[in-house]
Image (tube, coloured by chain):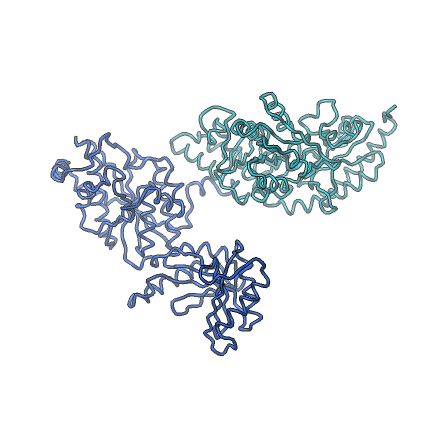
Amino acid sequence: MHYFDHCASSPPQEEVIRTMAEIMAKHYANPSSLHRSGQEARNLLERARLVIAGLFPGTAAADWLFTSGGTESNNMAIAGAARSLGRRGKHLITSAIEHPSVYDTCKSLEREGWTVTYLPANEAGSVSADDVEEALTAQTALVSIMHVNNETGTIQPVGEIGRRLKERGNVLFHVDGVQSIGKVKVDLEECRIDLFSASAHKVGGPRGAGLLYVRSGLQLAPVYRGGGQERNLRPGTENVPAIVAAAKAFRLAVESQAERADRMYALRERLLACISAIPELVLNGSPDVAAGGQAAPNIVNFSYPGMKPEVIVHMLEKHQILASTKSACSSKSDEPSRVLLAMGLPRDRAASGIRISFGDEHGEAELEWLCGMLRKVVHKLKPLERKEG
Amino acid sequence: MNPDMILLRFGEFTVKGKNRDKFDKRITEQVRKAVAGYARAEIVRAYGRIYITLNGEPYEEMAVKLKSIFGIASFSPILRTTSELEAISGAALAVMQALPKQPETFKVSVRRVDKGFPHDSQEMNHLVGGHVLRELPGLKVNVREPEVELRVEIQPEGTYVFSSVVPGAGGYPYGTNGKAMLLLSGGIDSPVAGYLAMRQGLELEAVHYHSYPFTSEKATEKVIDLVRRLAHFTGSSIKLHLVSFTDIQTAIAQCNHNSLIITLMRRSMLRIAEQLAEQREAHGLVTGDSLGQVASQTLGSMNVIGRTTVLPLLRPLVTMDKNEIIRIARQIGTFETSILPYEDCCTLFVPKNPTTNPNLNIVENAEAGILNLQEMIRQAVATVETMNITPEIQSAVESAGQDDWF
């Protein structure tokens, strides 16, 4: 089986599984308990926080909250900031290509009296820093832009946006970094990021563990109520085994990021060449960074206009290849991709997107196999194309 | 700009005749330790100064370490050039351009030690100043109150150019003014008192009283963290004496002199510290007392409590404002640990109305009524647990679990 769906969820690494299993067996005490076992669990939790802070220069352990994953981090960041900042102004800027956990949270704020600007992306999938700046009003309290788009893999100009926002002063900047950690360089300090979300299972960690960075001095309003854990923002007994395993996965991912990016850009280039050579397929997103584009190293998105993407996914699976249509979170709906539409792509192209996302286990041999299968599948499907009237 | 050298200047101790050698030796040793991790750095001793030649080692990292060495009054990053006008002018411009913020005014001060150099100091002031002014439009000369003083020293071996003077920690080299015991509770004040005492050249050993199970192990961990932080300033380690105070404290709590509990506790603590001082050959006790801050720190309380010991009681914070103490605690990195909410034995059994003006006779009578007090004190001293805390030892959090889990 060739698993090309790393952006949906990635295979956990052996040593991460071992960390999780051993801690689960030994350290079951509640970190809030006063006894020694409880304190040991607490210390594990705090050491995990130190490890995380060490991966992101300019951040302190106290700035990091453990959450259940990217969706929760995004909800807590946006709803929490909105509730604590409401008095500053009720305007929020985001983009039309965000993950549903950002997009739908913003939609729900509109029902609470917020005005939301949804910026479009260009054909390469990129939101423009100029557009962000132009959309700013005196009422703007928060800007939320993702780092790497989960469908196209396009890297957004968060550094440039962060710098311009700080020139304007009082606007908070949230970045959904779920797809960027371990793939592209993340520098929270340089990009002037106030809030940052991450998820462990995208980097070989366990599901049910995520991170939210909250810049020190920033007060979020709690979305949940409970026993005061995680600075009262994410109450509930901490998932110690998953959190420590997540810290390990994040560390491994961040420490090898540069090497991984180089390796994957080479693979991506081959895949792009292969897809370009199949006339029925059209690439979506941005060229590689080396070619002047803004693509993350691990994601390729293409369309087969006139073909239902589910058919391709199922055909590929017959040949032991697992890929996705749109993002896994919304792949069951029949609608065209909101992200591809926001990039201005025609409806037939937006409705037929396929995402290939690879991982550390893939090399040239796997990519060759994938290319061969794509050619084969397209050849078989060709007679079944639906031509627009 | 990574400078070529760092010039270290020392404080008042350099003028103190006989002790000077001891001071000199101690500070050189500490500077040597601070730069030990940088293989290419070399230390050059000169009269009343030390130069560190960097040979490419990073200045910024080293500066952080130098700032915590007691006895260094200030230091300056220096560019070193050959003694030729063009090279000196170039270095002067580089130094000005490397300033974190471009000043509006400056002046040049040239010292020509090498009299063989063709231009005298006055000429050099004009030549170097003129070059800098031409290259940095907007900059003006102000000889009376310049924002920046650009200094040039023409020595026989070469010319040193520098402008920034970074304040050091000041004081005396650690351990050059004797040894004392520090009573360390875990609050905000006592670590600051310890820091100030150390800065004045005192070597310290810390004494902490715990009342397990009334106090938690977290409280002890917290004190270890504080001592570790203080150990950063010594260049080596600090001994921490952990005293079990449970028996004494419960006896005092039951002696029916509720308002005197704190007074009686403090007196017993001083007795224990005094005996430990004798064993450790220390000649003073350092406390975090600040006049009037709590009931046991009124002048009346200090009088009755202090009588317990004949050793000098050093109270570096005695006239200091709380905000000032907190400012130092933040600066030395003890504040965040100090405010962790673990109870220490000083806050246990605290009466609602502690006396602010205890009567010595009543206090002495109350002590006489506590069965076996002297014996319990002797026992506390005999069972003391001593740890050697180095800056490198890991905290409970840093060493939690197994390393390969992370």
The residue at 23%/54% (across/down) is: B283
Residue A147 lies, with reference to residue A263, above or below; the image says above
Provide residue A340's location: percent of width, then percent of height. Answer: 74, 31
Provide residue B323's location: percent of width, then percent of height. Answer: 35, 42
Kindly indicate which chain is depicted in cyan in the rendered structure. A
Q: Is residue B117 visible?
A: yes
Q: Is residue B225 visible?
A: no
Provide residue B320's location: percent of width, then percent of height. Answer: 30, 45
Residue B232 lies, with reference to residue A248, above or below; the image says below
Left or right of A363, for residue B342:
left
> In this orientation, which residue lies closer to the viewer: B398 or A25?
B398
Left or right of B385, for residue A117:
right
> In this orientation, which residue lies closer to the viewer: A169 or B268?
A169
Tell me which corner region of the image, top left, top right, bottom left or bottom right, holds residue B90: bottom right
Residue lying farthest bottom? B116
Left or right of B386, for residue B393:
right
Instruction: Tally the numbered discs.
Output: 0
> In this orientation, which residue lies closer to the viewer: A226 or B72?
B72
Left or right of A280, for residue A14:
left
The residue at 47%/36% (across/down) is: A45
Tell me which corner region of the image, top left, top right, bottom left or bottom right, holds residue B350: top left
Kindly indicate which chain is depicted in blue in the rendered structure. B
Q: Quadrant of the N terminus of chain B?
A: bottom right
Provide residue A251's location: percent of width, then percent of height. Answer: 56, 42
